[in-house]
Amino acid sequence: MDNQAKTFDVDQYDADKLQPHKNNPDMVDGLIYKPDAIPLSQYRRKTKDPDSLVAFSNATEIMGDGTHEQSFYAAIYSGSTSGVYFQVAAKICDMMRESYNRHRVHCVPLRSQGVGSNIELMKEGRVQLMIVQSNNNWEAQAGVNPIVGARSVMSLHDEMGLLVVSKDSDINSIADLKGKRINIGPEGSASRELWMELLGQYGLKLEDMDTVYSVAQDYNQLGICEDYIDAFGLWIGHPATLIEESMNCDAKVVGMGGPLTQELVKANRYFFDQVLPAKTYSGQEQALESYGFKASLMAYEAADPYVVYWVARIIYENIEKLKTEFPTFSSVVAKDMFGKGNFLPFHKGAACYWETDMHACDWQELYKDPSKDSVGSKPSYTYMR
C-alpha cells in the first residue's frame, strides 16, 4: 500500500473521502467534532487504506480474557440531575445496557445546565446526542437560532406548560398573573424565552408584575414554599417530582390554555395542544387544558450513524415499556416520534431506521464484519436490520 495514501475519517459518510483539516485534527468537513465522554479512538478512526475500511476493526474493547470485541459509545447531553431530561437520558441508557449484546453500544447520560447549554455544547462540537425542545429544532432549521451540524433523530415525550401557584394567590389563568410575583428564569434560558412569548401573547409586560425574579428553576419550589413568589411556570414532561413536591406547600397547578394560547399554537408549528389528565398531581381533580411541544432528540451530523441508528431503534422498540415504567412517556403516540417535531433533516443513522428513502442505509456498507465474509460471497452486516 502506498504510504502517501490519503487518510479517511469514517465518522463522515459522504461520497467524497473527507480529510481532517491540516491545522486542526478535530475539524472534518467544516465541523469541529470532539465529543465529551467518548474515547478518542471512536471519533478519530482513520486508515490509510480506504478500500479495507472497516469500522469494527478500529473500535475494539479489551475484555477480561484478553480478547478484543467491537464496541461503540453513546453520550446523551440532557439537563440537571434532578430534571426530567436527565432521567429520560438515564432511562435510554438503561435500555441500551439491557440490549447491549445486540449492538455493543455503551451509553452514558450527561448532565448539563439545560437546553441552552446543550445547544452551545453542540456548537462547540462536544455533543453526540442531546435532548432539546421541538421549538429549538424548528428555530435551527428556520435559521432563527442556527445550530451548525444539528440533525433530528426523533421526538420523545410531550412537554406541557403548567403554572404552579399558591392557593391564596387568586391565579387561575395566565391573565391573572398581572400584579403577581413570578420567576421567569435567568437571561438566555429556554424557560425565560417561553415566558416572554406567552406573556406577550396575553398583552402582559414585566412591568405589569409586582416582582419578577430571574433565577434558576431550581429555586422555584423554595420560592413557593417560602412565599416570595406567587407562581412559577414549567414546560416539562409530567408528572414531575419538582411540581409534586411543591404541592406540599399549599400550592396548586393551573393550565396555560385559553383562546389566546390557541392562537399561539396555531401560529407556531412546533407547539401542540395538550391536556393534563385529572389526578396527575395531588389535589388536581380536573383535567387541565394547556399547550406545549415535544422533547426533541438531536444528533450532531458528525456522530457515528451506527450509534445514532441503535439509540433510535432501541427507544422506538421499547416505547410500550417506556410508557409503563416512565410516566412521562404515558401520552406518547409511537408514530409521532417520527412524524412530529422533527423539522431538521434526519441524521443518517436515524434516517436509516425511519427508512426515509431507498439510500438511507447506504452507510452500512462501512460496517462489514470481515470475519463473516467468505470468498466470493456478499459481505454480511453485523448488528444491523
Image (spheres, rainbow, N blue to C red):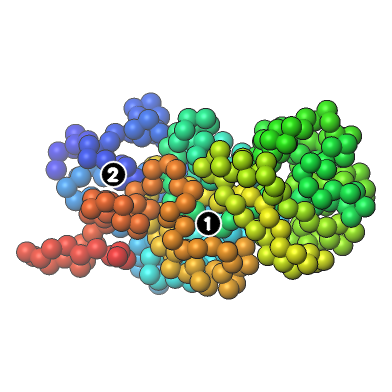
Give SS at disc 1. Answer: strand
Q: Residue at image x 38%, y 43%?
A: 345
| Position of residue 119 measured from the top left corner of the image (x, y, whole percent) | 55, 39
164 sits left or right of 15 in the view: right
The quadrant of the image that shows the C terminus is: bottom left
365 sits left or right of 326 in the view: left
Quarter of the image for residue 207 reads top right
Q: Residue at image x 75%, y 39%?
A: 185
Vertical placement of 355 versus 298: above or below?
below
- For disc 2, the neighbor class at 10 Å (few under 14, some 14 to 19, many from 20) is some
Name which of mark 2 and mark 1 comes first in the sequence: 2
Q: Circle 1 sits on which residue?
A: 156
- For disc 1, the neighbor class at 10 Å (few under 14, some 14 to 19, many from 20) is many
58 sits left or right of 169 in the view: left
| The disc label shown at residue 3, or none | none
| The disc label shown at residue 13, or none | 2
| Position of residue 200 measured from the top left corner of the image (x, y, whole percent) | 70, 33
The quadrant of the image that shows the N terminus is: top left
Between 174 and 73, which is closer to the camera in this rendering?
174
